[in-house]
Image (cartoon, rainbow, N blue to C red):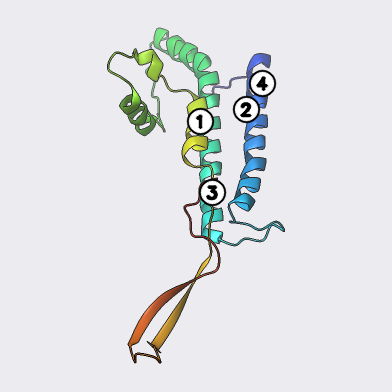
C-alpha cells in the first residue's frame, strides 16, 4: 500500500481550510436562524430546508477535502507510477471523481480569449461555489396546508373544496 505523509506545509494548509470550514459551519447555523429555517432557540421551523442546507454543506466539505488531499498526494502517486513503470510493471489507476461538471460550468463562464489556466479548478472553487450558490440567504416562511371540504361563502353561496395555504410566515424569496 502506498502511503503519503503530509509535509508541515501541507498540514498548515489543511488546518487553515479546516478553520475556514468551521467558520462557514458556524455561520450556516446563524444563517438558518436569520432566514427562519430555525428559530432563536434552535428549534427547526422548516426541516426539509434545514436538511438540504446541512446536506449541501457536508457534501461540499467532503468533496473539497477529498480533492485537497488528492492534490497533496499527487507527487507521491506520480513518483510511484514512474517507479513501477521503470520496473516494467503496469499501473492501474482508478479515478473516482473527474470534476467534469464543475469544469463544464467553469468553461461556460470563460470568454473565448481567456487562457485555459484561468479556468483551472482548485479545491477553493468548491468553497466559492457553495457560498455563491448554496449558502442559505433566502427567508423561509411556514405555510400550513389545510384540506377543506365544502368551503363556501355565506354571502354569495359559492362552494369550493381543495387545499388552501394558510401563511404562518414568509414564503421563500426575501433575500437578505
Provide residue 37's location: percent of width, then percent of height: 58, 56
Residue position marked by numbered label 3 in the rendering = 53
Specify which label sits upstream in the sequence, 3 or 2. 2
- Cα distance, mark 3 to mark 1? 15 Å
Quarter-of-image position of residue 87 = top left
Give the quarter of the image for residue 158. Answer: bottom left
Marks 4/1: CA–CA distance: 22 Å
Whichever of labels 3 and 1 marks the residue nearer the N terminus, that label is: 3
**Image x and y of residue 70, in percent:** 51, 24
Q: Quadrant of residue 150?
A: bottom left
Element under label 3? helix
Left or right relative to 41: residue 86: left
Secondary structure under the numbered disc 1 in the rendered image: helix
- The residue where tag 2 is placed is 17
Q: Which residue is mark 4?
A: 11
Q: Residue 11: x percent and y percent? A: 66, 21
Quarter of the image with the C terminus in it? top right
Nearest-to-viewer mark from 4 and 3: 3
Distance between the alpha carbons at the discs numbered 3 and 2? 20 Å
Q: Earlier in the sequence, mark 4 or mark 3?
A: 4
Label 4 crowd (10 A; few <14 / some 14-19 / many >=20): few
Foreground: disc 4 or disc 1: 1
Label 4 sits on a secondary structure element that is helix
Which residue is tagged 1? 128
Mark nearer the N terminus (1 vs 2): 2
Question: Which one is nearer the viewer's eye here, 116 or 166?
Answer: 166
Going from N to C along the chain, the mark reached first, 4 or 1, is 4
Q: In front here: 128 or 58? A: 128
Amino acid at each position: 500500500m502506498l502511503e503519503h505523509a503530509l509535509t508541515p506545509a501541507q498540514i498548515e494548509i489543511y488546518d487553515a481550510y479546516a478553520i475556514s470550514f468551521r467558520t462557514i459551519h458556524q455561520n450556516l447555523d446563524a444563517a438558518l436562524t436569520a432566514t427562519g429555517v430555525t428559530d432563536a432557540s434552535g428549534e427547526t421551523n422548516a426541516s426539509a430546508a434545514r436538511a438540504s442546507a446541512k446536506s449541501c454543506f457536508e457534501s461540499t466539505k467532503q468533496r473539497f477535502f477529498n480533492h485537497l488531499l488528492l492534490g497533496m498526494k499527487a507527487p507521491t502517486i506520480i513518483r510511484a507510477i514512474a517507479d513501477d513503470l521503470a520496473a516494467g510493471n503496469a499501473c492501474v489507476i482508478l479515478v473516482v471523481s473527474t470534476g467534469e461538471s464543475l469544469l463544464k460550468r467553469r468553461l461556460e463562464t470563460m470568454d473565448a480569449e481567456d487562457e485555459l489556466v484561468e479556468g483551472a479548478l482548485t479545491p477553493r472553487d468548491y468553497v466559492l461555489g457553495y457560498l455563491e450558490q448554496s449558502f442559505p440567504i433566502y427567508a423561509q416562511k411556514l405555510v400550513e396546508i389545510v384540506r377543506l371540504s365544502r368551503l363556501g361563502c355565506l354571502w354569495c353561496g359559492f362552494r369550493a373544496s381543495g387545499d388552501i395555504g394558510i401563511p404562518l410566515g414568509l414564503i421563500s424569496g426575501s433575500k437578505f
